[in-house]
Image (spheres, rainbow, N blue to C red):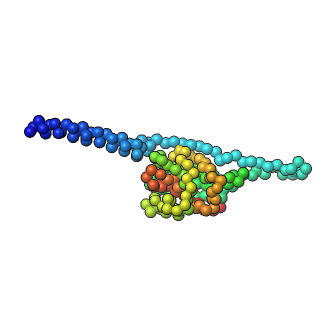
Amino acid sequence: MRRARKALTKPLVIGVLVVAVAGVGFGLYWFQPWKLWQDETVQEALPEIVTTSAPPTAVAETPSSPVGPLTLASGELISHEHATSGTVKLVQLADGSHVVRMENLDTSNGPDLRVWLTDAPVKEGKSGWHVFDDGKYVSLGKLKGNKGSQNYVLPDDVDPARYTSVSIWCDRFDVSFGAAELARA
């Protein structure tokens, strides 16, 4: 009897160890806890200002006037799932294209973070954590860094007037790290 119990115990212990190791491996892959201690700073300049000059037949009495980025809307980031701060701007460039610009961003790093342009209202506290995938949104790509200033180009077919907020969205856990309501300039 003792020998039979020992024979059953060894495979059971091995099975439990295999499941535990697989569970820890999956947990590490899924949650990526080391990212909480890894900061990635990205400092991008706003695209350059383009200057225009007077036509060759006219006499220019004033210097060239800058034609450049125009801020259409802006807002301050508020914290949701993680402490988040910084400014978000919706900017129209001289060529007519648009970018979402984050300035002085400071948030936690995490797995699968995205920048979303959305039509959802920005709500304080836990009630605002999960609203951004309820309506219309456009993913502008992966968050380039959890600190710094960075630009995200809007696709040409996106009408920026239809969107009212920006969220730093964790796609893996369907939660907002932080968001900003865009107030029109």
Who is closer to the viewer here, 55 or 7?
7
Who is closer to the viewer here, 79 or 139?
139
Who is closer to the viewer here, 118 or 65?
118
Residue 67: where, in percent of width, then height? Answer: 75, 52
- Residue positioned most to the left: 1
| Residue 77 visible from this viewpoint | no
Q: Residue at x 18, y 39 (%)?
A: 9
179 relative position to 154: left or right? left
- Is 65 above or below relative to 4? below
Split into 4 quadrants, where in the image is the C terminus?
A: bottom right
101 relative position to 176: left or right? right
Residue 126: where, in percent of width, then height? Answer: 43, 60
Q: How many marks?
A: 0
Q: Residue at x 46, y 58 (%)?
A: 129
Split into 4 quadrants, where in the image is the N terminus?
A: top left
Residue 73: where, in percent of width, then height? Answer: 63, 59
Residue 175: where, in percent of width, then height? Answer: 45, 55
| Residue 111 visible from this viewpoint | yes
Q: Residue at x 63, y 59 (%)?
A: 160
Q: State which quadrant residue 158 falls in.
A: bottom right
110 relative position to 156: left or right? left
Q: Residue at x 61, y 44 (%)?
A: 44
